[in-house]
Image: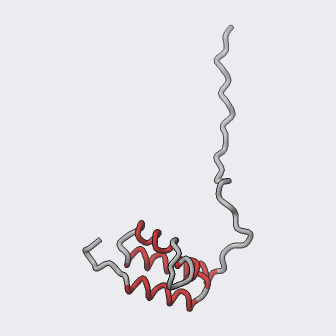
Amino acid sequence: MDQPPAKPAATRRTNSHFRKRGTPLPPADARRQGDISQLAYLQMGGRDPAIAFLNSDHPALGGRPLDIATASAEGYVRVAGIIRASAVPAGAA
């Protein structure tokens, strides 16, 4: 008697293409990272402009705004000032 072909074992998907951090982000750094991301999202007209700004080198800051804002309270203030200065007026986005 013919038996149906065996189904291959289900493969488990992994996110192995993401690099794992050795240690988690300290709470204060994580808070600044979340706060600056939210500020950029709200002030710059949405997700795409915020991501582009936060992840691109900024000459006045000397690095990526997300890294600068996450690293220290002073860096957060500098990046937040630039975001507020370049805010998209309400209704223009």
- Residue 31 seen in the figure: no
Q: What's the colour scheme?
A: secondary structure
Q: Residue 36 location, x and y as percent? A: 49, 80
The residue lying at 48 percent from left, 75 percent from top is 37
Q: Which residue is drawn at 32% across and 78% down?
A: 88
What quarter of the picture does the C terminus occupy? Answer: bottom left
Count the labels in the image: 0
Q: Say left or right for 47 vs 24.
A: left
Q: In this view, does 59 lie to the left or right of 8?
A: left
From this view, report whether residue 36 is shown above or below residue 15. Answer: below
Picture coordinates of residue 11 (x, y %)? 67, 40
Residue sitting farthest toward the top: 1
In the displayed image of the protein, which residue is found farthest to the front?
Answer: 59
**Residue 27 screen position, x and y as percent:** 63, 81
Could you tell me residue 61's position as x and y percent?
53, 84
**Residue 84 seen in the current view:** yes
Q: Dividing the picture into quarters, in which one does residue 32 lie?
A: bottom right
Relative to 62, residue 15 above or below: above
Task: Find the residue positioned furthest to the right.
Answer: 22
Residue at 66 percent across and 37 percent down: it is 10
Quarter of the image with the N terminus in it = top right
Q: In terms of depth relative to the viewer, which is nearer, 16 or 4?
A: 16
